[in-house]
Image: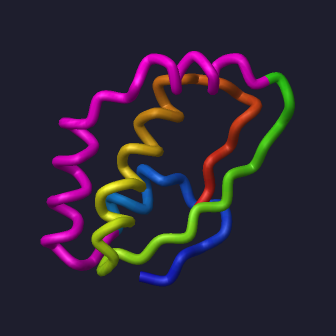
């Protein structure tokens, strides 16, 4: 899947073409529990940041960490951070 600038990480996960990777990413999204210290730090960011996430659905590290990052950022709910793939 080619990455597009401005794609929401949750949309990216839902559009993964390799079924094994999509299933693993969705499972990781459900099972992952972010560290509360990380959430606290993200919630206290007071400057605007754009995170650029490079990912490939065939990459094991991406399958493991993109859902974790997406979930952590969603829980932190800080408008100063905008994740985009």
Say whether residue 41 is left or right of residue 66: right
Q: Kindly indicate the quadrant of the structure image that contains residue 49.
A: top right
Render colour scheme: rainbow
The residue furthest front is 37
Residue 59 image offset from top left, x and y in percent: 33, 76
Residue drawn at (31%, 63%) of the image:
63
User: Which residue is more in the foreground, 62 or 16?
Assistant: 62
Report if residue 21 lies within the magenta region: yes
Residue 65 image offset from top left, x and y in percent: 38, 54
Q: Kindly indicate the quadrant of the structure image that contains residue 5.
A: bottom right
Q: Which residues are magenta?
A: 16-45
Say whether residue 61 is left or right of residue 6: left
Residue drawn at (41%, 37%) of the image:
71
Residue drawn at (63%, 22%) of the image:
41
Residue 14 image offset from top left, x and y in percent: 32, 59
Residue drawn at (45%, 44%) of the image:
70
46 to 11, vertically: above or below: above
Report if residue 34 lies within the magenta region: yes
**Count of marks, rendered view:** 0
Quadrant for the C terminus in the image:
bottom right
Quadrant for the N terminus in the image:
bottom left
Residue 56 image offset from top left, x and y in percent: 41, 77
79 to 25, vertically: above or below: above
User: Which residue is more in the foreground, 2 or 53?
Assistant: 53
- Give the dominant element type of the magenta stretch: helix, strand or loop: helix
């Amino acid at each position: 899947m080619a990455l597009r600038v401005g794609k929401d990480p949750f949309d990216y996960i839902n559009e993964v073409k390799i079924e094994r990777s999509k299933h693993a990413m969705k499972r990781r999204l459900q099972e992952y529990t972010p560290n509360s210290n990380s959430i606290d730090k993200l919630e206290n960011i007071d400057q605007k940041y754009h995170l650029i996430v490079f990912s490939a659905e065939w990459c094991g590290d991406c399958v493991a960490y993109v859902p974790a990052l997406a979930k952590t950022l969603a829980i932190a709910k800080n408008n100063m951070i905008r994740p985009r793939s």
